[in-house]
Amino acid sequence: MSFTIAHITDPHLSPAPPPLGSEFRLKRFMGYVNWKRGREGLNDMAMLDRLVADLRAERPDHVAVTGDLVNIAMPAEFRRAAEWMATLGAPGDVSFVPGNHDAYVRSAMPMLARTFAPWTTGDDGRADFPYLRVRGDIAIIGLTSGQPTGPLMASGKLGRAQIEACAALLDETGGRNLARVVLIHHPPLAKGAPPLRGLTDAAAFERMIAARGAEAILHGHTHKQLVRSLPSTATKAAGGRVPVLGAPSAAAATHDPRYRAAYHLVRLQREGDLWRVSARVRGLALDGDHIGERAALAV
């Protein structure tokens, strides 16, 4: 059998509202200034609508959204983000994990959890992390690396408890011969991002994957198309390494092909006791403004 996951990430839905009155926080103010100076001119919401329409037309088996729906975690942004998530499909067919911009300030964390509960509720009925959603022969495990940080920081952290709970889910679902797909916002690699922007406990995550295995890991955060892998003695991915795939920002109308808006169609195909992972790329054309097929990823 085969199963296709559409992986879309980092839309940073715009515009960002100014942080006024009781919603003012220094980090929000600095983030708003940065948005005005940079992302406001980069993000194309009309193009994002066309990208989502293209994604829906591809009829994937599931959609994975790996964070940064918003910019400075304002209540109005969360409401708009929930409406956008609904355009991707029914909550049972769409899974979400938050990014650092979704968890921008501590006061936003309760609303973040409430707003996105439909897309983070596991098969046990709890909206908690890590969550497990089994779809056919695929185990989707969602982690949260987004956490409030100080100004000018964009780092993430899983924490020991979440890593241990993820390890238990990988063991349990691996024992059921399911293909295990881990969703996380920050690239889960010790050298996955610059200082103050990476996953602070990536080394611990790498050790856990080496021992427990997974068949694919999908992430966002870098706004760049990335294909990497992690070694593991317990993976059932063909080739013996766990593919780690990062997608560009889904709203980025930049001319740089590495960052130009796209989403991935990640296909998991059972081959005996192993799983073959492949990925197609669809997005904003490199030579125009239409949405179409781009070069497949060498996974």
Image: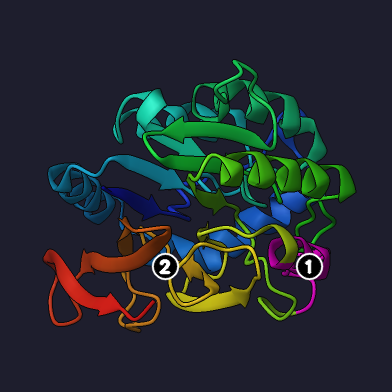
Task: Categorize mark 2 by other alpha carbons within 10 Å: few (<14), some (14-19), many (20+).
Answer: many
Where is residue 233 shown, x and y percent of the image? 66, 70
**Label 1, on which residue?**
207
Q: Secondary structure at mark 1?
A: helix
Disc assigned to residue 248:
2
Q: Is residue 19 left or right of residue 80?
A: right
Q: CA distance from mark 1 to mark 2?
A: 26 Å
The magenta span reads 195-210
Where is residue 177 shown, x and y percent of the image? 50, 45
Residue plotted at (45% across, 54% down): 9
Q: Secondary structure at mark 2?
A: loop
- What count of labels does the image hold? 2
The residue at the far right in this view is 160
Earlier in the chain: of badge 1 and badge 2, it is 1
| Any part of residue 56 in sight | yes
> Disc 1 residue type?
Arg
Where is residue 204 shown, x and y percent of the image? 83, 64
| Any part of residue 148 in sight | no
Where is residue 39 shown, x and y percent of the image? 48, 64
Q: Nearer the viewer, residue 283 or 128?
A: 128
Residue plotted at (68% across, 45% down): 171
The residue at the far top in this view is 125
Q: Nearer the viewer, residue 212 or 245?
A: 212
Q: Is residue 86 left or right of residue 158?
A: left
Q: Nearer the viewer, residue 213 or 30?
A: 213
Residue 205 colored magenta? Answer: yes
Residue 212 colored magenta? Answer: no
The residue at the far front in this view is 272
- 208 relative to 21, above or below: below
Residue plotted at (75% across, 76% down): 190
Q: Is residue 90 left or right of residue 96?
A: left
Q: Are marks 1 and 2 in contact (CB under 8 Å)?
A: no
